Image: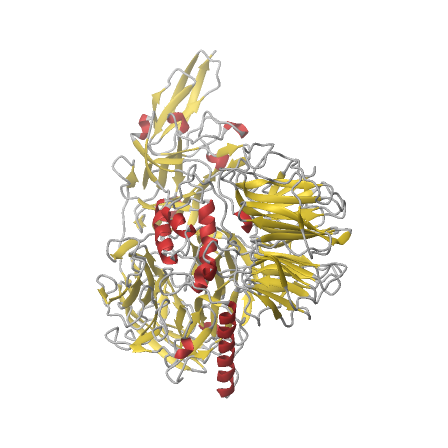
């Protein structure tokens, strides 16, 4: 950035599409790539002129199934391209963006419709408000819990030259924010204006209330600090890159854009185009503002060129002395940025990206001028590759130039204002030079120190005196020492981009997966708006258990139990199957719960419906809808009034094919396809009444005007069209029924929210308090407080009071409907649609203890076997509702007896393998060189599978009877070595857990890991107990016997499970599991040690004797008599061992 608080190095949105198919302002310039590279089919289609988005999606999905984790330059570009295209996809799947005048006409029509509806209302509507995230924080893993730049994608930034406390920034979500205290707090100042993502922003040098911003096809100006904005210029495909306001004459404003260079001499009132070619960056000479520098693309030469003006930008002259001048036929211009510094007013740095020749993979070089641009050098030649340690490629994810890059999307550069040789350059990672660009060192991002966390994808860097700022996909960071130290300053930047969204039911929980910033969570005990960062990538995920609201689920990090307190620990919980997920609205599957039991879970994955009866630990296939796995099952509705009735939508794998609406009346055993109403039925959204299984609403996201929303009152036999002209040109993105109303339904679109019930003649805009435009991803109800909530694309989470109050709709729920344990404690929970203000609950449990309760969530036991009804009555000021669920609970008595054992030679025997994430878990392993273990054992490859916190289990049968077992013991053999390398050690753990209350709670009987569990005899690292390579036991000496005395559970019924806790360490092995009656013995040489009946142990005496005579009671010496080491097999009762040593 420049000395004068230069406008941000924000990036343009140029499309590689036809001019009439420009997309929503995003940084989606086509990246450079090798001309000899073989592109996958979907990438070829995407890069073609006027691509069909749905066909690209289909080809991409097919490729992604075969390449589930691969990241390339093209996959990174696809996400940005697809997001930018989303608002403008027509019914045929092509991009059709309206011209600027058409956009203004549509916005004016919408404003008039809202105003007209407001004049007809007898009272004002409730106001929406943003509830976060206001700021995101690290989870508590040490004594610090700091704000973290995993908040929102900030495209552009500027600091006031006249008042450095005042900052402005623009977010990918289409919002402008202002701070008056140097970033400690931010406020959105653009919500009343339908802006695209600002890609450039500039503050007047002497009046911080005057600001220009480039937003898509338009340039906006405010003269009052953002209280109001005026459009001062527009043109199709404008996409502003940079803005400069002249220091000596602020009436001169320059705008570099994809459409060329524009100049105003009257403060932005009128503009003249100086060049039509794409222009990347503008800088003013620090000591002479009449001198202006320009970086401009030359499409005919496929090169970026440098220009200089000495008359305030009125005219420019190209200077090429020493400048980049590749003539290679494969050269590509990917864009450029430059910076100047008051530490040396003649110094200029320019970073060029693209390729000077084929294979350069995104980086050409950093050029330098020491004479105000009259001549140039390349301090670290050559231009482009080959890349080596001394000549890295900072643009790619790997310094050697391999892997992906993101082109102009993340590119920034700034020189120190006190030392002209110090330079920061941002790409995927942030890099630093101390010697005028001769060498570069990574500071953070994908490369650099892990202890100096910097969010990847640097969008902009700015220097202003001693202040240094860099903005990224995660937000704004501030430093005063060139990033030796830095801090996140994002409080109030509410532009989190929610690709997934879930909420709690009786406890206030908010979760979601976000574009760029992973998964986040908030709980009712935390400060409002302060969210935890849970990790993960960019998954469209985030689900909440309606009974255990702190149990949350994310496809990229698994199940997580979020803490009750902000500084508490996040725990991993099992969850095995996740739904189809998409970055885009109306494309994702669902996690749904049986309304009677919060541990009965249904998931739509591929073309299938899966079911779990144990909270997601294990899933079974319930039904497959055809054989084409690309025909995704998406939305699922389970009837509260009759849970055997469900509706499911399925998208056709064919790009333009009609999808299906399926219905079951037998709980999912069989399904039939319903006849659809007229309209483009490629995709569907559905919502179901809680009191009538035949009342269903259906919306077509791709439906044309007049064919967008329908309802059926007879289970799909016939349909009523609810579409009116109010919904013209609106994209249906989510629908939600408000239970307890007369047919109340919300529609979230790409711009607005609507509501209608059976008494309203038309759809009502329900937008008071919302931004002028907001794109709905998911709507969720929060009946406890009478709220509707929205997870929005690029604008955070919003909530509002329901349009109207809901009458109560009762629904009892329980943690399990079937138990084999008469002593089992069942946890009931209220799943009613109920505002909790002045609410009461009355439960009835015939045959249970207690038989009645007025708690919201009582615990109940049933001492006798049988089938039991449950009734719940809920009451609040809006009414009362009673529901009785016949046969809600079934109690039986099932027990299992000892012994329970397996040597894994013929499978797992009575032990069940539980693999919650359906990834690497306990599996068969062929034993080598240890006859005691037989031929097979079971192992978990933690060396291969890096998912710290993941738990894989071996579970013994439920309710093992120990009433006639005085000395129960569990024995097994284990082999393990933790992992170590130069970066540190990674350890895994083994636990044995025992429950004596039907699995409701478990006690730890054994826990060991790391060095203490290690059995390696040839290790490295501390105490030679670690391995660098994948560990496999080579002989019997690398196995350990473990015997656990479980006599404290004698006389009881127990459940036992063995857990491997993944720490991305090394492989763990187990064998010869035996749970039986095993009286303990106490062999003695020095001291007393516990042993197990029938187990074999080794005993060693000091070396140096000529003969050793061992005496053993209650045991048999198997080998070693006469030597200093023997092996003994013990029998029941106290035993002793002694030895006489002859010298």
Please name whichever residue, 461 or 578, is drawn nearer the observer in this view of the structure: 461
Please name whichever residue, 158 or 625, is drawn nearer the observer in this view of the structure: 158
Q: Name the residue: 66% across, 38% down.
A: 322
- What is the count of numbered marks? 0
The image shows residue 236, relative to residue 1067, as above or below, that is: below
Image check: 600 left or right of 569?
Answer: left
x, y percent for residue 636: 33, 64
Please name whichever residue, 457 or 569, is drawn nearer the observer in this view of the structure: 457
Image check: 855 left or right of 668?
Answer: right
Q: Is residue 997 visible?
A: no
x, y percent for residue 335: 57, 48
Location of residue 7 by image quarter: bottom right
Location of residue 256 by image quarter: bottom right
The image shows residue 719, relative to residue 161, as above or below, that is: below
x, y percent for residue 405: 51, 44
**Applied colour scheme:** secondary structure
Image check: 440 left or right of 990?
Answer: right
Q: Is residue 924 visible?
A: yes
Please name whichever residue, 948 or 13, is drawn nearer the observer in this view of the structure: 13
Location of residue 885 by image quarter: bottom left
Image check: 85 left or right of 392?
Answer: left
x, y percent for residue 925: 33, 34
Q: Name the residue: 51% across, 33% down.
A: 980
């Amino acid at each position: 950035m420049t000395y004068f608080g230069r406008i941000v190095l924000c990036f343009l949105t140029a499309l590689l599409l036809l001019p009439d198919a420009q997309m929503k302002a995003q940084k989606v310039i086509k990246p450079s790539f090798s001309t000899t590279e073989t592109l996958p089919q979907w990438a070829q289609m995407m890069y073609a002129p006027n691509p069909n988005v749905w066909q690209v999606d289909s080809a991409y999905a097919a490729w992604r199934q075969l390449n589930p984790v691969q990241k390339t330059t093209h996959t990174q570009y696809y996400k940005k391209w697809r997001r930018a295209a989303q608002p403008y996809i027509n019914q045929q799947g092509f991009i059709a963006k309206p011209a600027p005048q058409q956009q203004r006409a549509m916005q004016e029509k919408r404003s008039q419709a809202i105003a007209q509806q407001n004049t007809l209302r007898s009272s004002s509507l409730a106001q929406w408000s943003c509830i976060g995230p206001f700021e995101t924080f690290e989870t508590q893993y040490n004594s610090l819990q700091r704000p973290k730049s995993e908040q929102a994608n900030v495209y552009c930034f500027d600091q006031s030259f006249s008042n450095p406390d005042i900052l402005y920034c623009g977010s990918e979500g289409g919002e402008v924010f202002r701070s008056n205290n140097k970033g400690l707090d931010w406020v959105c100042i653009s919500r009343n204006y339908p802006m695209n993502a600002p890609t450039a922003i500039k503050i007047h040098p002497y009046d911080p209330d005057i600001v220009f911003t480039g937003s898509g096809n338009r340039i906006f100006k405010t003269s009052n600090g953002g209280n109001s904005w005026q459009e001062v210029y527009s043109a199709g495909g404008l996409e502003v890159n940079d803005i400069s306001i002249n220091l000596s004459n602020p009436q001169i404003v320059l705008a570099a854009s994809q459409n060329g260079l524009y100049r105003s001499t009257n403060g932005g009132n009128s503009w003249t185009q100086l060049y039509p070619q794409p222009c990347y960056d503008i800088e003013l000479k620090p000591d002479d503002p009449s001198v202006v520098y320009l970086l401009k693309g030359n499409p005919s030469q496929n090169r970026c060129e440098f220009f200089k003006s000495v008359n305030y930008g009125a005219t420019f002259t190209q200077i090429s002395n020493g400048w980049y001048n590749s003539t290679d036929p494969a050269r590509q211009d990917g864009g450029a940025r430059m910076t100047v510094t008051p530490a040396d007013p003649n110094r200029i740095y320019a970073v060029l990206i693209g390729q000077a020749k084929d294979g350069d993979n995104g980086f050409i070089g950093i050029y330098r001028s020491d004479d105000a641009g009259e001549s140039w050098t390349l301090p670290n030649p050559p231009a482009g590759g080959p890349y080596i340690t001394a000549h890295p490629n900072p643009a790619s994810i790997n310094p050697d130039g391999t892997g992906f890059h993101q082109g102009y999307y993340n590119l920034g550069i700034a020189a120190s204002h006190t030392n002209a040789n110090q330079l920061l350059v941002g790409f995927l990672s942030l890099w630093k030079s101390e010697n005028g660009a001769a060498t570069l060192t990574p500071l953070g991002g994908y490369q650099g120190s892990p202890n100096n966390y910097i969010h990847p994808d640097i969008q902009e860097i700015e220097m202003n005196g001693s202040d240094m700022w860099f903005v990224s996909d995660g937000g704004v960071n501030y430093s005063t020492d060139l990033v030796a130290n830095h801090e996140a300053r994002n409080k109030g930047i509410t532009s989190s981009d929610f690709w997934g969204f879930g909420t709690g039911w009786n406890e206030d929980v908010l979760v979601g997966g976000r574009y760029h910033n992973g998964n986040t969570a908030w709980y009712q005990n935390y400060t409002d708006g302060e969210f935890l960062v849970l990790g993960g990538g960019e998954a469209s995920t985030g689900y909440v258990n309606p009974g255990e609201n702190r149990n949350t689920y994310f496809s990229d990090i698994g199940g997580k139990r979020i803490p009750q307190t902000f500084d508490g620990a996040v725990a991993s919980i099992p969850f095995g199957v996740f739904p189809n997920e998409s970055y885009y609205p109306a494309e994702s599957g669902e996690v749904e719960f049986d309304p009677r039991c919060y541990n009965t879970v249904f998931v739509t994955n591929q073309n299938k419906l899966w079911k779990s009866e144990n909270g997601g630990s294990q899933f079974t296939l319930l039904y497959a809808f055809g054989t084409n796995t690309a025909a995704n099952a998406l939305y699922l509705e389970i009837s509260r009034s009759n849970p055997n009735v469900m509706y499911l939508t399925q998208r056709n794998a064919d790009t333009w094919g009609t999808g299906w609406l399926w219905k079951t009346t037998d709980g999912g055993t069989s399904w039939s396809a319903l006849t659809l109403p007229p309209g483009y039925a490629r995709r569907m959204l559905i919502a179901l009444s809680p009191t009538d299984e035949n009342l269903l609403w259906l919306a077509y996201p791709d439906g044309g005007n007049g064919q967008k929303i329908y309802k059926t009152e007879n289970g799909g036999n016939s349909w009523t069209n609810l579409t009116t002209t109010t919904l013209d040109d609106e994209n249906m993105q989510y629908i939600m029924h408000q239970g307890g109303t007369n047919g109340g339904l919300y529609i979230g679109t790409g711009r607005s929210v609507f509501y209608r019930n059976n008494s309203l003649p038309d759809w009502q805009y329900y937008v008071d308090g919302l931004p002028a435009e907001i794109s709905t991803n998911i709507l969720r109800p929060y009946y406890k407080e009478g709220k509707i909530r929205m997870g929005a694309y690029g604008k955070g989470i919003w909530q509002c009071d329901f349009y109207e109050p809901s009458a109560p709709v009762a629904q009892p729920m329980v943690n399990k409907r079937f138990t084999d344990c008469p002593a089992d404690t069942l946890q009931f929970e209220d799943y009613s649609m109920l505002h909790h203000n002045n609410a009461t609950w009355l439960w009835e449990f015939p045959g249970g203890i207690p038989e009645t309760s007025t708690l919201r969530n009582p615990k109940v036991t049933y001492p006798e076997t049988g089938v039991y009804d449950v009734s719940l009555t809920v009451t609040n000021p809006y009414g009362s509702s009673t529901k009785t669920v016949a046969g809600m609970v079934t109690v039986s008595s099932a027990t299992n007896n000892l012994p329970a054992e397996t040597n894994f030679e013929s499978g797992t025997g009575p032990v069940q393998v539980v693999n919650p994430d359906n990834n690497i878990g306990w599996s068969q392993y062929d034993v080598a060189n240890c006859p005691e273990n037989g031929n097979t054992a079971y192992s978990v490859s933690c060396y291969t599978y890096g998912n710290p916190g993941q738990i894989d289990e071996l579970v013994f049968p439920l309710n093992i009877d120990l009433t006639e077992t005085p000395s129960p013991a569990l024995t097994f053999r284990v082999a393990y070595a933790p992992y170590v390398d130069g970066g540190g050690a990674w350890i895994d753990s083994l636990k044995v857990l025992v429950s004596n209350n039907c699995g409701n709670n478990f006690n730890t009987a054994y826990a060991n890991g790391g060095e203490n569990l290690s059995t390696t005899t040839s290790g490295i690292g501390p105490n030679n107990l670690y391995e660098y390579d994948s560990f496999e036991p080579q002989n019997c000496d690398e196995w350990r016997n473990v015997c656990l005395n479980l006599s404290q559970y004698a006389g009881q019924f127990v459940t036992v499970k063995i857990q491997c806790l993944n720490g991305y360490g090394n492989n763990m092995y187990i064998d010869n599991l035996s749970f039986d009656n095993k009286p303990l013995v106490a062999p003695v040489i020095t001291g007393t040690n516990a042993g197990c009946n029938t187990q074999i142990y080794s005993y060693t005496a000091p070396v140096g004797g000529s003969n050793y005579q061992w005496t053993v009671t209650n045991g048999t010496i198997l080998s070693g008599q006469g030597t200093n080491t023997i092996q003994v097999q013990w029998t029941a009762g106290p035993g002793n061992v002694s030895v006489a040593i002859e010298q």
